[in-house]
Image (spheres, helix red, strand yellow):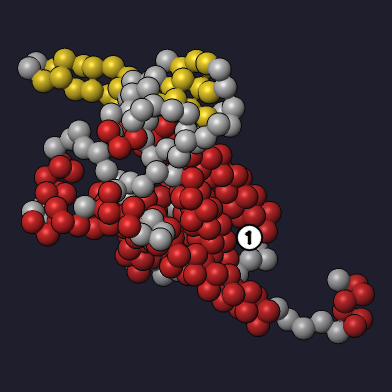
Amino acid sequence: MFSFVFSAVVWDVSPEIFHLKIWDTTVSVAWYGLLFAISFIVGQRLLFHIFRREGKPATDVDLLTIYAVVAAVIGARLGHFVFYEWETLLTDPWHWFRTLVTPPFRGLASHGGTVGILVALYWYARQKTDQSFLWVTDRVVIPVSLGAALIRLGNLFNSEIYGKPTDLPWGFLFVQETDPRLLPVVPRHPTQLYEAFFYLFLLALTFSLWKHKREQLSEGFLTGLFLTLLFTFRFLVEFLKNDQAAFEASLSLNMGQILSIPAVLAGVMLLITARHNRSFTKPPQSSFGSLIA
């Protein structure tokens, strides 16, 4: 599957785990699909824990999961065509949907998935009088961090979305590369792993803040922190990545970086607003009160 040669990791892993023969149809089980499914299953269990600790019914998590799964898949798939294959979308507007319902398909845009999930969470929150939109997003960003890490591991198994050539000792030789633009096969940055490790750090950070500081944090703080850190890192790591589409070669910043900028700005605005709300709602203390606090 993989081995070390000279100062690089030889990555020669099949994207498919195994095949199943069902009547006259062959069904392939892929690492990406498995990790994608695990991200929602484990994420749902994490949300169960969070909602239980906050006295919310488990049925809310079931509804929220359905909304998030459908919105993430549709948003990520449609986003891929809007951001990277817009010419196909113009000539055949329903191509994205046909390839969505008739797998296998390749091409999911994380920025599109983010927009899809936010729309779904807004729709969900409108039905709940005890859960505001930002209250929901502050909780959902925790399992989303885990999902982002697992999806990047899926990209690793697919030998896709990796970096530029490197002479660092942890460079990966992606043997199964078929894109003629990226041949010959040379050691490259395993940017999938860079992102996966960072998203796991983001999972630990947001979960720890929720667990220990949620009573002191204003609504929107965790969402703002998540957006700011994730998309700042995404902006920076894109400097190490290959372009995902040919048209990006003519751009000063690639599409991933362009789409990350408004997300970072939105995150910063949420952090500023949360800080302002916290300062506004915090009761003033007298000098005597501060001594005994």
**Count of number-bearing discs:** 1
Of helix, strand and loop, which one carries label 1?
A: loop
Residue 185: tell me if it is visible.
yes
Judging by the rendered image, the residue that carries numbered circle 1 is 214
Q: Which image quadrant is residue 24 in?
A: top left
Q: Is residue 181 left or right of residue 207?
A: left
Query: In the rendered view of the protein, which quadrant contains the N terminus?
Result: top left
State whether residue 208 is above or below residue 118. above
Query: In the rendered view of the protein, which quadrant contains the C terminus?
Result: bottom right
Residue 124: tell me if it is visible.
no
Q: Residue at x 35, y 69 (%)?
A: 126
Where in the figure is residue 105, as x and y percent of width and height?
Answer: 21, 37
Where in the figure is residue 224, as x and y percent of width and height?
Answer: 54, 65
Q: Residue at x 56, y 44 (%)?
A: 198
Where in the figure is residue 244, as x and y percent of width and height?
Answer: 33, 46
State whether residue 239 is above or below residue 280. above
Q: Is residue 78 left or right of residue 42?
A: left
Observer-nearest of 39 and 1: 1
Crowding near pointer 1: few (<14 within 10 Å), some, many (20+)?
Answer: some
Q: Is residue 235 left or right of residue 105?
A: right
Q: Which image quadrant is residue 154 in?
A: top left
Q: Residue at x 8, y 54 (%)?
A: 92
Q: Which image quadrant is residue 128 in?
A: bottom left
Q: Residue at x 29, y 48 (%)?
A: 245
| Amino acid found under the numbered disc labelled 1 | Arg
Where in the figure is residue 27, as x and y percent of width and height?
Answer: 19, 22
